[in-house]
Amino acid sequence: MAVRRPIYLTDPFDGSGIYNIFEFTDAYMTDIVEFAGYVHAQLPGVQMVVGGTSGTQLANQGFTDTYYIAGTSTTRVDRYATEAETPNISMVTDTYSLLREVRYSSPLDLSDTNNLKFPLYITATGNLQAMTVYDFIDTFVTPALPGFTGGGSALSKGGTYFLTTSNAPANATLVSATPVAVNSVANVAAYSSAGIPEATEQTIDTNYYLAKVDYDITSYDPMEAVLPVYFDAGTETIRQHTLTSWTNLLGPFLQYYLTNDPTYQISYNVDGPDGIAAGSQFVDERVVPTGTGYTTRYVNADDYRTQEFPTGTATTVSGSGKQFKIHFGPVTGVTETVSLEGTSTSPENNAGLPLAGTPPTAFGFRFSTDGTIEDFASNRTPQYVSTGHVPWVNTTPTGTWYVRITDVSTPTAGQSTAGYSSGSWVDLNTIARSFSVNDSRAFGSYGYAEFTWKVDISRNNDGTNIAATGYYRVRYEGGA
């Protein structure tokens, strides 16, 4: 294991077709380490998305925006409606929780059976030799990791995320045109007597977007022209890496280390105890009403109009600030703990009563990606209820968790299971996992019934490293 100085090719431009071989200079060694930012930006090890169901929703979001809107206008043919008769302004509250974290973490491929997979370097005896996988890590991966730390949008931080109020941030691309939060303030200047009936909602909006540090390739000149070379065993020629081949080679290593390394693993949070500010802080501003805003408009002798408008000056709501953060290393503020309820002799219950005349009836549970556990009953509104159940994890889940649902009971006449495959491991990072029992019997044709499952949660999908085991049961009365 050692840091090696890779080589690159230069074209003499004399038409000979004979390329010269040079070792990387100190400047090129610095450049190739910085270039890891470009590689990582192509598919970050920890990816942030806006909305959808993939990954895990960041805890403590609730970016709350409050603002005033006008009351509904009135029209009379005999006189103006009084202030008391005119609907008041009202405050609207919007809450945004769209940030989700997706973690890519596959085992490293450390095999190199023909010792030709990695870049070439010149040995002390003047021979060309391919780096080992550990040489590759020491030369290109380990030196690049510190460059990702801290905030900002330097070249070396490609693939990290921040919040911005710009829809065209420098050195970055928007993850989505959909804002992750909006600060709306009543546009008091937009309301006028002459405009009655005015639209009730008229605001000045500040949009907060999620952006990814992502430079154009030209920013890395001249790196593209001097990427390391390797030996192509298929053609028995020395070839220079392309952007695509270099990204495919280095990318998985960066993904692995930036999701697993004890010092450099990346995570994101909102107002958490760990991490540093990444971009703009969200704040909620709204006008402080001065008076009622009661306004009249005379159109003609048969048309008297009134409406109440928002008034005042915009101020920041105390305590409304929320900060998106990036963190490197283990999360120290909260210890992630998985726990499940119920034992084989005393399972956690979901009890219900089927509705008359509505077979089939289904009862069960749903384990969500954010850690919540919910009851399910097909004939209840709402069908899913989390009240009474302890979450399967005590904080926002990180990494990959797997769940296995195994039948303890055997279906009786009329019963059938749905939503899962008994005894199979499935991940809990990308989709909520449901399991239920359906009963096709008519209400009043049977009495007490139940069904029990065993639930295991693990970091692995092979039955090892099980973090918690619990038992969950549905019990219902058929009315007979």
Image: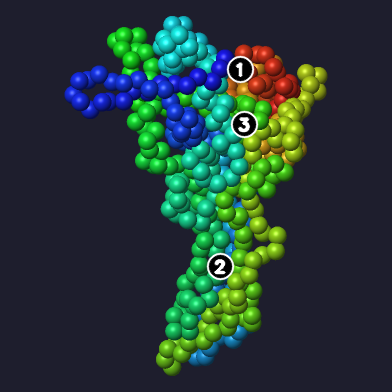
Does label 1 or label 2 sit earlier along the sequence?
2
Circle nearer the N terminus (3, 1):
3
Q: Which residue is mark 3?
A: 265
Coordinates of residue 127 in the picture (x, y in percent): 41, 9
Element type at mark 2: strand
Question: Mark 3: which amino acid?
Answer: Gln
Residue 181 x %, y % = 55, 54
Q: Amino acid at mark 2?
A: Val
Q: Up-down: is 167 above or below 329?
A: below
- Residue 461 occupies quadrant: top right
Question: Residue lying farthest left?
Answer: 15
The amino acid pointed to by label 1 is: Asn
Q: Report the residue marked by disc 1.
A: 461
Q: Determine which residue is flagged by label 2.
A: 185
Q: Nearer the viewer, mark 3 or mark 2?
A: 3
- Tell me where residue 239 appears, x and y as whole percent: 33, 18
Neighbour tally class for label 1: few under 14, some 14-19, many 20 plus, Cα within 10 Å: some
Q: CA–CA distance between discs 1 and 2? A: 49 Å
Q: Nearer the viewer, residue 440 or 324?
A: 324
How far apart are the two marked residues, 3 and 1, measured between alpha carbons? 22 Å
Identify which residue, 292 or 38, lies in the foreground: 38
On screen, residue 15 versus residue 383, left or right, reads: left
Q: Where's residue 378, x and y in %?
A: 60, 35
Q: Is residue 446 left or right of residue 98?
A: right
